[in-house]
Image (cartoon, rainbow, N blue to C red):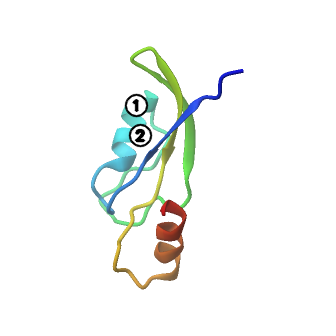
Amino acid sequence: MKRKNIVAVIGRPNVGKSTLFNALAGKDISIVKDTPGITRDRIYQDVEWLNQSFTLIDTGGIEPDSKDIILSQMREQAE
């Protein structure tokens, strides 16, 4: 049985990761706001795009120099 590919959307806060996630998912799943830090937990969605099936993951923004404990933990998970 072939395993489904996994694609994670990662990047700095407030650059449109959740907007891209929703567009690829074809529906509004992730909350989109102009306030940084809205997405804290990973959000998973099975997606088909250009005849390819995969699991898409929306992630919270990663701020490389942040001392915030939650942001630090998110950064560690991404690494």
Q: Position of residue 76 (x, y in %)?
A: 51, 70
Q: Residue at x 45, y 60 (%)?
A: 60
Label 1 crowd (10 A; few <14 / some 14-19 / many >=20):
some
Q: Position of residue 55 (x, y in %)?
A: 55, 34
Q: Is 54 situated left or right of 33 in this image?
A: right
Q: Position of residue 44 (x, y in %)?
A: 57, 42
Quadrant hosting residue 37: bottom left
Q: Residue at x 35, y 73 (%)?
A: 64
* Quarter that holds the N terminus: top right
Judging by the rendered image, the residue that carries numbered circle 1 is 24
The answer to whether residue 42 is above or below residue 40 is above
Q: How many discs mark residues in the rendered view?
A: 2
Disc 1 residue type (three-letter): Leu
The answer to whether residue 5 is above or below residue 37 is above
Label 2 crowd (10 A; few <14 / some 14-19 / many >=20):
many
34 or 15, which is in the foreground?
Answer: 15
Q: Position of residue 9 (x, y in %)?
A: 41, 47
Q: CA distance from mark 2 to mark 1?
A: 5 Å
Mark carried by residue 12: none
Q: Is 27 situated left or right of 77 in this image?
A: left
The answer to whether residue 42 is above or below residue 46 is below
Disc 2 residue type (three-letter): Phe
Assign a secondary structure to mark 2: helix
Residues at discs 2 and 1 in contact (Cβ within 8 Å): yes
Mark carried by residue 21: 2
Q: Residue at x 56, y 58 (%)?
A: 41
